[in-house]
Image: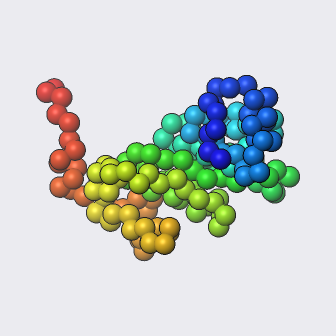
């Protein structure tokens, strides 16, 4: 159950909501800081942590959450990155999900979004709920030059 209440509600409210569902509760796109993720997991009952690397912490922050969340530390939370934005951030979130392990999932917006679908030369290919991973080095594919020109914002300076 993803974000059944606002992230700014007290942790006791999150704990009550988490106990009310048989399905695991998930949140994170509006949680900031490793200590906050730890508190939401330990006191709020979250079982799926969804940091948004564009909003807080980047790849390093997601790694910190991943390192403190897992069974290796006696915890029982999974890391499923949240992301809604451009292709660069989506690819980076997919990398985090891949590093988190085979049980991780990565949120993927299904709305039309040219900044996600047209900004890189290799568009996302989703097949049977999976992304076809490019066979190349680097975090993200090369930018699509013609798309960069279309998305350019001239500010007159």
Residue 31 visible? The answer is yes
Q: Spot the residue most to the right.
A: 74
Residue 138 percent coordinates (x, y): 43, 62
Image-based side of 1 in relation to 59, left or right:
right
- Quick one: 43 or 21, which is closer to the camera? 21
Q: Spot the residue most to the left.
A: 156
Q: Residue drawn 17% across and 48% down?
A: 149
**Vertical relation: 43 (above or below) 114:** above
Residue 25 percent coordinates (x, y): 70, 45
- Quick one: 129 or 39, which is closer to the camera? 129
**Vertical relation: 4 (above or below) 47:** above
Image-based side of 145 in relation to 30, left or right:
left
Q: Residue drawn 20% across and 36% down?
A: 153
Image color mode: rainbow
Quadrant that contains the C terminus: top left
- Quick one: 144 or 126, which is closer to the camera? 126
Residue 109 percent coordinates (x, y): 44, 51
Residue 35 visible? The answer is no
Residue 81 percent coordinates (x, y): 57, 50
Q: Specify the quadrant of the image occupied by residue 32.
A: top right
Q: Residue drawn 81% across and 56% down?
A: 71
Q: Specify the quadrant of the image occupied by residue 36.
A: top right
Q: Residue drawn 47% across and 54% down?
A: 108
Q: Specify the quadrant of the image occupied by residue 99.
A: bottom right
The image shows a total of numbered marks equal to 0
**Vertical relation: 11 (above or below) 119:** above
């Amino acid at each position: 159950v993803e974000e059944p209440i606002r992230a700014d509600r007290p942790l006791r409210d999150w704990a009550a909501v988490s106990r009310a569902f048989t399905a695991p509760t998930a949140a994170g796109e509006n949680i900031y800081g490793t200590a906050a993720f730890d508190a939401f997991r330990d006191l709020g009952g979250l079982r799926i942590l969804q940091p948004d690397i564009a909003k807080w912490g980047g790849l390093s922050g997601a790694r910190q959450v991943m390192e403190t969340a897992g069974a290796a530390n006696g915890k029982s939370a999974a890391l499923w990155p949240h992301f809604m934005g451009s292709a660069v951030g989506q690819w980076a979130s997919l990398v985090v999900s891949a590093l988190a392990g085979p049980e991780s999932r990565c949120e993927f917006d299904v709305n039309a979004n040219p900044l996600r679908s047209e900004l890189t030369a290799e568009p996302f290919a989703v097949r049977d709920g999976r992304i076809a991973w490019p066979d190349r080095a680097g975090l993200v594919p090369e930018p699509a030059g013609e798309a960069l020109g279309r998305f350019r914002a001239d500010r007159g300076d």
